[in-house]
Image (tube, rainbow, N blue to C red):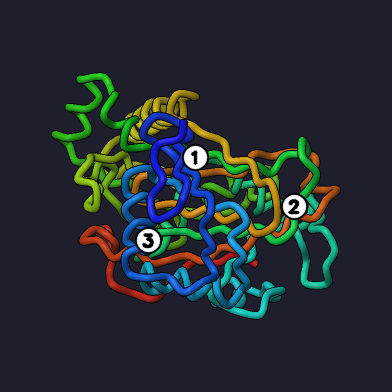
Amino acid sequence: MMLATTNGFELTEISPGFGAEIRGFDAAKHMTDEIFRFLQDTITVYGVVIIRDSQLSDESHIRLARMFGELDDVKPYIAAGRKNRLRYDELFDVSNIEADGSIVHPDSPRGQANKGNSLFHVDSSFNPRRAGYSLLLAHELPPAGSGGKTAFADTRTAFAELDDETKEDLLVNDYVAAHSILHSRKLASPEYFADVDPSRFPMGRHKIVQRHERSGRMNLYIAAHIHHVEKVSEEKSKALLEKIFHHATQPKYVIEVEWKQPGDLVIWDNTCTMHRVVPGPYSAEFRRDMRRATVHDSSSTAWGLNEHSNVRQGLP
């Protein structure tokens, strides 16, 4: 539904209150403070914003991302042994492409790890400082119908529509969850990661229920990275996580974004949404070149209950 024409842009709502598409927006041009505020405010309201044919290069992609705050980088992944296919460490390579240009083999270590991207998650919750905004840009896309859409879940509305008993339980107990990238990878590929024990590695600790500061709305900060809920039994932890995760990923809270052409850009706020790639045959047959700039969260809950440290997790 077309909502407004602001600053010469067409703004279309994808789902009531969640997800918006902006047309007529050249993100590569000089951005005034007024236009940037419009963009950031739109993300605050809708959680996810799509900009078609953004005209961004790697350089202008990074410049735009820096307007949102301090950037994360891929150095932990490089230190773990991955060869960086891209020119800039500020861009995360979330493609299925090897450094030599070939398609990542599904049975390779990276192919197995990539399966975790098909689970609903937030970026970098397993690190001491979590991600705020993510800016994902399409450079090369597989054929339509072969998979590769990106799905998003509205975790603010999901919290608002929880049953009263569960909502009271969450608010009264103020649960803390421990996030691990190894846990989500093991969930998605249990046989390959069978010998990996996530509990032996650092985890990011964040409260499950938080107030999303820019909007003032309450939010479920959950992800497939969650290994356990602290200070409850394993049974209670599992039951609680399954309940709220199932609730938050119901179709009524989820939108799917179709990538239509190279240059399409999607920006989302990790502190009020979850996302996942929709799998399909493309992953073994067609190149999907996607590059993400990740902005460190700057809210008062950016570090969760973690020490302020630059120690970050990365997989080869």
The residue indicated by pointer 1 is 152
Residue at position x 17%, y 36% in the image: 173
Image quarter of the C terminus: bottom right
Residue 29 coordinates in the image, percent (x, y): 51, 71
- Displayed quadrant of residue 68: bottom left
* Residue 190 visible in the picture: no
Residue at position x 47%, y 65% in the image: 294
Residue at position x 46%, y 51% in the image: 9
**Label 1 environment density (alpha carbons within 10 Å; few <14, some 14–19, many ≥20):** many
Residue at position x 32%, y 61% in the image: 37
- Mark found first going from the N terminus, 1 or 2: 2
The secondary element bearing badge 2 is classed as loop
179 or 138: nearer the viewer? 138
The disc labelled 2 sits on which kind of residue? Leu
Residue 3 coordinates in the image, percent (x, y): 40, 36
**Label 3 environment density (alpha carbons within 10 Å; few <14, some 14–19, many ≥20):** many
Residue 11 coordinates in the image, percent (x, y): 44, 44
The secondary element bearing badge 3 is classed as loop
214 or 106: nearer the viewer? 214
* Residue 184 visible in the picture: yes
The residue indicated by pointer 2 is 141
Residue 243 coordinates in the image, percent (x, y): 38, 25
Q: Which label is found at residue 130?
A: 3
Q: Which callout, 1 or 2, points to the residue nearer the camera?
A: 2
90 or 207: nearer the viewer? 90
